[in-house]
Amino acid sequence: MSATVHDVDQKPAVTALRSKDLLGISDLTPDEITLILNTADAMKEIASRPIKKVPALRGKTVVNLFFEPSTRTRTSFEIAEKRLSADTLNIAIATSSVVKGETLADTAMNLEAMRPDMIVLRHSCSGACHLLSRICRSAIINAGDGMHEHPTQALLDAFTIRERKKHLQGLKVAIVGDLAHSRVLRSNILLLTKMGADVWVCGPPTLMPTDIRRFGVTATSNVEHAVRDADVIMMLRIQLERMEGAYFPSLREYFNIFGMTEARLKLAKDDVIIMHPGPMNRGVEIASEVADGPYSVILDQVANGVAVRMAVLYLLAGGAEHEEAA
Amino acid sequence: MKRLLKGGRVVDPANGIDGVRDVLIDGDRIARVGANLPADGATVVEIPSGLVICPGFIDMHVHLREPGQEHKETIATGAASAVAGGFTAVACMPNTNPVNDDANVTTYILDKAREANLARVYPIGAVSRGSKGELLADIGDLRKAGCVAITDDGHPVKTAILLRRALEYAGMFGMPVIEHCEDPSLKGDGVAHEGYYAASLGLRGMPGACEALGVERGVLLSELTGSAFHVAHMSARASLRAVRKGKEAGVRVTCEVAPHHFTLTDEMLATPVAYDTNTKMNPPLREAADRDAMLEGIADGSVDAIATDHAPHHYDEKKVEYDHAPFGIVGLETAVSLSLDRLVHSGRITLSRMVELMSVNPARILKVAGGTLSEGAPADITIIAPDLKVRIEAARLRSRSKNTPFDGWELRGGVAATLVGGRPLYVNAETRITL
Amino acid sequence: MPDSKSAVVMDADRIARTLTRIAHEIVERNKGVDDVALIGVRTRGVYIARRLARTLKEITGDDVPTGTLDITLYRDDLMRHAVGPQPVIRRTEIPFSIDDKKILLVDDVLYTGRTTRAALDALIDFGRPKGIQLIVLVDRGHRELPIKADYVGKNLPTNPGESVQVRLQETDGNDEVVLQQEATV
């Protein structure tokens, strides 16, 4: 069963990404997004082979530089890199605001001296990737920078939606959760609006980014309005620390007003899909029955993450100038 | 020594002058200003056409960093940067290390300034000991040692009651309280103006209301105490509204705006270089409506002074993640060009008004000599070249630090010469003035 | 319509007869199509493989499993250039096990042999076939690797400056093989 939207022989509008890095969805055009998704589609097949490896990035060194702990994203990138035969190096840096070690700039310059081909960076400060990209010649892939963007997450979310719904344009996508602090939200809003989806964002005003409407979405605090007739519902994680910042009074109250329950799910379309970037807080933003129910594609998202990351690594790694060679 | 500055346009609004005049300097004083003065043994300096002679500019908000942070700037390098920027005097902030909450620190600063022998330096003392916001500093001592105002700049005075007391006490000496207006709880750990760009870039924001709240508090307390209250580095339209209301009600409130707040907006955080830490300062670059309000206030007289909030930081300190970078940019050597280009040449204000903002009013607010070219006044003179093509080059700034967002900017207008007490301390050869 | 610098070396009729001839050769050489599978390389090899499968069904009555192979990720010229667009990847679909099968690799033009080398590498990762045979519509010479085709539609001696264009109904609207005098970039 082929889930590709584009006919195998149709030439894509672009065949390469313009930038040497992937710092955010904000830098990608709709054609580039389509290129990544189509490439991911081809990459996905590799996971079903007996030998889940292709020599495409053989001899390339990829450094996973993670300043924030992450098992999920890091393993996903690592598997993707290894499936492309790249040499991977994982560097996990524990940061403490009290003990200031080497600056990011110095870490980058030291790394650069060893000539990695690509650096996958996750950092707790927005804009850390931009700083790295100004210092390093390597291709930089943003695996999440502060509250700014998490582009590969949005790409795998789009891939998952496209797999189920065959297209992105015109779909009603409702995103519920901590919108102000979420890099996943920012990336998803940018991507979905670029691809012509009808995006609704929902959360308490205390967790709503300033000027949210300027992002081309419909903002509401009424979760029923948001999910009514939705094709896709995306739940974002609520960080428990937000209670201390007086963003909302209690988790119980949050769940009552905004939590995704089976009752609220009924307002959406019959073939709605439920997504969550993980990790989930069961009973806070999402009821367990919903997370484990038939509408959930949460596990597909994880599987697709590897294919999407393989596509990004491949496209940024540079290659031959001609498409056809005998 | 006598010097006759001959045939230049003189703009001296305090004396109602805007026209061609000769200026006779005798020693360190202005002897006479008039048309066709006789040389009478003075060295005659023909003023090239197009240059304008003004009373020396005074920057009432600079951070000289000495004592304690000499890697960023020293009093000597700061004073050199000042004269290169056309300033004959600067007032320096007390958030040094140690804080200038003590006469010894004040004296140290004045000694260093005397050593440098360049721009005049007027120290501003702290409101509270260590600027901690608990106990009042020895304001009388500070006054005696040479401080012209008090502030806890870097942050607002901690409590309303302390600000009240400071206003009452400093009022005794006729000293204004200068306030970094801000509500700390609203500020939180914000690093940028709360708006579309901070939201796009994932940066924590501080809304304009955060500053305005501080302004409103100060205006009310100034009214209550009858003392002079000065709003430092105003940036938000809501703050301007509060200042205007205060002035209308007769409150003794004044305010200053920095050139970056009437030139730049928060869009610069995203382009041309995303997350450029030279766009990070407090108060932050705000949205266009705030920048436009500052321009309006400058034009209609609600704004009293232009002050740079010159905040040098070492290159290493700024080459970090946006969240971790210190707030502030240098400003002494870009202020005149920005003011001429963006305010005068754009038609918003006259040169007279610019001189009010940069000389007359700062002198009046701080109650220091200057602001005029009256006979007997100190010969502190700023000669500007309003049509000079200037290209700002960070690497060539005289300040020890180069943290400016204006690198590469091409502006119309610059400094021709700066004289302090009759001595020419900076001369721009490009303007062909021979001093 | 070919321009004055090109010549049609095979027309639709000729192509059809050639493929029929190859299909018969396949049956003869493999004594039937019992453990035979077709895998088409890249775009046009795929359509040629499908046509062969249809003809083989007509001849033998048997269905021959057919798959598609994208060899892009196995090319030896990937990553050789510092900056440049990556070749576009398309899906590989081999919905059967290739173990112990005689794989007939199908491509439109055999030239340097590097595509075939890449295809062999890819196939080895899919399993262990009993054997691999190579079918090409046109062999234009100038091998750079020790690769030879087992079934050739037409031997066409060429100069390096020339290019061989295979056009098929399914992708280009008509069937023909054209030899162009100057390589078009």
Image (tube, coloured by chain):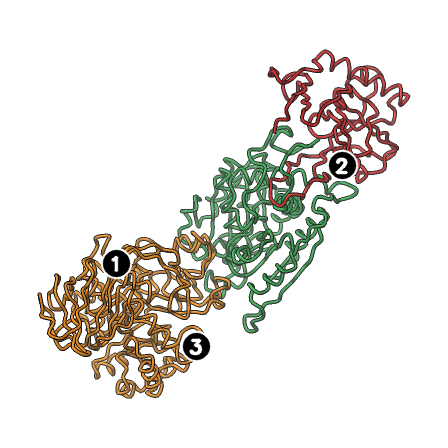
Chain colours: A green, B orange, C red
Q: Dividing the picture into quarters, in which one does residue C103 lie?
A: top right
Look at mark 2 in the image and give the residue it sits on. C118
Viewer can see residue B244: yes
Q: Are marks 2 and 1 on the same chain?
A: no
The vertical placement of A156 against B281, above or below, is: above
Q: Please name the residue shown 70% across and 40% down the image.
A: C77
Distance from label 2 to label 1 (Cα)? Answer: 67 Å
**Quadrant into which the N terminus of chain A falls:** top right
Q: In front: A281, or C14?
A: C14
Q: Is residue B58 left or right of residue A295?
A: left
Give the x, y percent position of residue B349: 20, 57
Give the x, y percent position of residue A293: 63, 45
Q: Residues within 10 Å of mark 2 (few under 14, many from 20)?
A: some
Q: Is residue B231 left or right of residue A236?
A: left
Q: Dividing the picture into quarters, in which one does residue A283 lie?
A: bottom right
Look at mark 3 in the image and give the residue it sits on. B69
Q: In front: B32, or A34?
A: B32
Q: Please name the residue shown 66% across and 53% down the image.
A: A62
Q: Residues within 10 Å of mark 1 (few under 14, many from 20)?
A: many
Chain of the residue under the numbered disc 1 shown in the image: B
Q: In front: A293, or B18?
A: B18
The vertical placement of B310 against A188, above or below, is: below
Q: Please name the residue shown 11% across and 70% down the image.
A: B33
Determine which of the numbered discs, if any, sits on residue B340 in the image: 1
